[in-house]
Amino acid sequence: MDKVQLIATAPMGLEAIVAREVRDLGYDDVMVENGKVMFQADLSAIARANLWLRTSDRILLKLGEFPATTFDELFEGVKALPWPDWIPGDAEFPVEGRSHKSQLSSVPACQGIVKKAVVEKMKQRYGTEWFPEDGPRYVIEVALLNDVATLTIDTTGPSLHKRGYRKLITEAPLKETMAAAMVLLSRWRPGRPLIDPFCGSGTIPIEAAMIGWNIAPGLRREFSAEAWPTLDNSMWDDAREEAYDLLRDDEPLDIIGSDIDPAAIEVAEANAKKAGLSGELKFYQAPVAKLWPETEYGCIITNPPYGERIGTKDEVEKTIRQLGSIYGKLPTWSLFALSPSKQFEHYFGNNADKKRKLFNGRIECNLLMYHGPLPPRQP
């Protein structure tokens, strides 16, 4: 088993960022499709991808892909795949499914067929009629798209956005994966000041600090595939040792989060402490109108209120106008704001240099990019 096919699932709009992260890990055999990045790699990539990918949701092990327009085709195609090479006889193996633009549109029926086919294949290997399913968990997924079935096993478990540091959240939290994507799409680098004036639970400052110090985002959590006897534990040990070796915690960080809500600041400080960054990040209570950076160059990276769950539409308009007014007095700063408002540029008082469509959960947004000049190179 020299090479495996892996799929890094990607939130809509972030596929190119996920693909760049995969290539940065040294995997060049990469294909990008809507919602996923596929790549071929050795077994160690299962551990390394789970530990390192900041903007992917999960890492799936691809077992096979084939046309399926009937239940017989689905059953035979699934049964032909090498399930016992991965799944031991005592494993728990639930089946999840989804179908889009396919004749096999009943997801529960497809799940039942897949389960039956996997059991039949397992019977051939293990010589038993019954499986207790009280061992390690292998979540199988059947995904039907345009009458093609893709069969995978989830190696991740809880989504990769669950880094392990955010035990407390504010009312409308930004996912860690999206916060990391915003930082990666900006011009920010460690050592350059970064401010988030709507920091909420502190996700953008924390993710920026993790990027600045090259902290693997999965370093503080566990993954489903760690319990698989078919994978050597040393693979995970080696991946974590590599991650610790690559830490750069001597990099200076100048990262500030502020918010008008004092409870949000308490949450942000608690989360930063949980992430091991409480001494490196500064949080303070203040309205955006009080934002005034003390340095000449820097980045504002933020997720202003939407008016969906927090604030009224009028308050959102006022907030964006205040942000624009402040930014108008900062000609050497860059700003990156995620907003669903179609009138953001109008309220802000300036057209963005670039816009990128992203989805914050199910809310369609734009990442509006205002590029200030880069600071001069240090001699």
Image: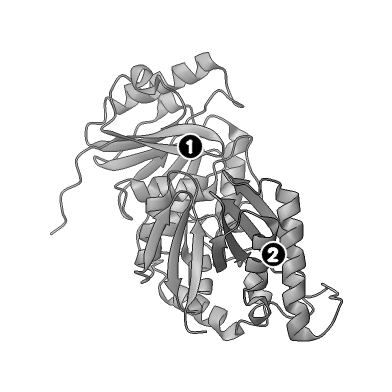
Neighbourhood count class around disc 2 (C-alpha, 10 Å): few under 14, some 14–19, many 20 upward: many
Q: In the orientation shown, which residue stands out farthest toward the top?
A: 314
Q: Earlier in the sequence, mark 2 or mark 1?
A: 2
Looking at the rendered structure, the number of numbered marks drawn on it comes to 2
Quarter of the image where one finds residue 61: bottom right
Helix, strand or loop at disc 2?
Answer: helix
Quarter of the image where one finds residue 295: top left
Quarter of the image where one finds residue 249: bottom left
Helix, strand or loop at disc 1?
Answer: strand
Residue 2, visible in the rendered structure: yes
- Residue denoted by label 2: 75
Q: Classify residue 94 as left or right of residue 73.
A: right
Of 278 and 65, which appears nearest the observer?
A: 65
Quadrant holding the C terminus? bottom left
Residue 255, visible in the rendered structure: no
User: Residue 226's x, y, as percent?
Assistant: 64, 75
Q: Classify residue 253 as left or right of residue 62.
A: left
Residue at horizontal 73 percent and vertical 57 percent from the top: 111
Residue at horizontal 62 percent and vertical 77 percent from the top: 82
Neighbourhood count class around disc 1 (C-alpha, 10 Å): few under 14, some 14–19, many 20 upward: many
Compared with 73, 134 (above or below) is below
Which disc, if any, is residue 258? 1
User: Residue 368's x, y, as percent?
Assistant: 35, 33
User: Residue 99's x, y, as percent?
Assistant: 62, 48
